[in-house]
Amino acid sequence: MALIKVTNLGKEYEGQSVLKNVTLEIESGEVFALIGPTGGGKTTLLRLLNLLEVPTSGSVYIDGVDVTRSERQRLKARRRMAYVQQKPIVFKLNVYGNVACGLKWRRVKKEVIRGKVDSALELVGMRDYKKRDARTLSGGEMQRVAIARAIVTDPEILLLDEPTANLDPLSVSKVEEVLEQIIGEKKITVLMATHDMPQGQRLAGRMGVLMHGEMLQVGSPSEVFCSPQSREVAALVGVENVLAGVITGKENELVTIEVDGHSIQAVSDLSLGDKVHVLIRPEDITFKLTRSVSSARNMFNGEITRMTQVGQLVRIEVYCGIPLLGVLTMVSAQELGLTIGKRLYASFKVTAIHVIKRRD
């Protein structure tokens, strides 16, 4: 039985639908990431799961118990959870007092509180700060205090809303390190909303893509990033080559797809005549100046129409009768002598392509 289960969950604010028929199950001890654009419904879903709000439709189950609308069941379930908000909230107390407050509200004995608070602060690397006024801390330090306050009550479920939003890279790294340690040591169930998709990949065993209030895909990070099930998910996870075509040939699982008069070969279980989208990640395209023997079945000659430097990488757009976007290192681009207008060959393997059925 799943620890957390939601069925057909919906939420409206002033007649505006924010969540639509979300169904999801999360097992005990699982780390689950919610990814999606700002305004996609991630925070709303977390607030519903934390029982801070009542859904407009659907149900929330904790350990098989419907906690959607019963005040008694909701209070009982909330005692098993902790929620860390995107913007850390600290009270007008020192760090120790901030972390201890949840235990004091539960009327835990002082000597027990002392041990638990010290342990929580040690875990988040803030033990030496316990006498500091929490309001004088940096954003990253405040977030670590908020996490310590959440875990000090030994929750079964930890809900995190954008835990590293608006933090500098060093603070992000420290907070992630703390979360990895908590996940490893506490073995609690973690549900984390994040717009930082690599972070979701690093920390979570499964993830869900929430866009426009709808759960578009649920799966392992590799499934979501390598095999997106829709054009919207593909765009979100960085698959920038999305080509519309039709399957015109099929031999077992090797299909030929016609895209604007050009043939692309891929592996797919879709049928002859299906209208599809061909998805190719930029990093899976290889560029050479001359046509050479290659294991890649797909090779096109084209002209560079645009080049953009991004750090040590160069994004190049090539028109081969079909538009292709690829990525090379700056060193590789210089070695090839790439410039706008130069002709070259772009190739990619059949296994580098993901094919999905078009909705239109």
Image: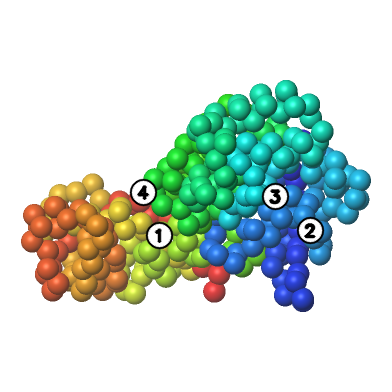
Q: Position of residue 289 (x, y in %)?
A: 11, 59
Q: Position of residue 79 (x, y in %)?
A: 79, 40
Tags 2 and 3 in contact by the CB under 8 Å rule?
no
In space, the residues marked 4 and 2 are separated at their CA atoms by 45 Å
Left or right: residue 318 compared with residue 72: left
**Marks 4 and 1: which is nearer the front?**
1
Instruction: Please give the residue where the numbered disc 1 appears in the rendered image.
Output: 239
Instruction: Please give the residue where the numbered disc 3 appears in the rendered image.
Output: 24
- Tag 2: amino acid: Glu
Viewer-nearest residue: 38 or 177: 177
- At a point 14% along the width and 52% down the height, the residue shown is 331
Figure check: 148 above or below 136: above
Left or right: residue 165 compared with residue 101: left
Q: Would you call the spot at circle 4 few (<14 residues within 10 Å), some (14-19), or many (20 or more)?
A: some
Viewer-nearest residue: 351 or 234: 234
- Tag 3: amino acid: Leu
Of the residues under marks 3 and 4, which one precedes in the sequence?
3
Left or right: residue 308 compared with residue 124: left
Instruction: Please give the residue where the numbered disc 4 appears in the rendered image.
Output: 351
**Marks 2 and 3: which is nearer the front?**
2
Of the residues under marks 1 and 3, which one precedes in the sequence?
3
Viewer-nearest residue: 147 or 204: 147
- At a point 69% along the width and 56% down the height, the residue shown is 45
Instruction: Please give the residue where the numbered disc 2 appears in the rendered image.
Output: 53
In space, the residues marked 4 and 1 are separated at their CA atoms by 15 Å
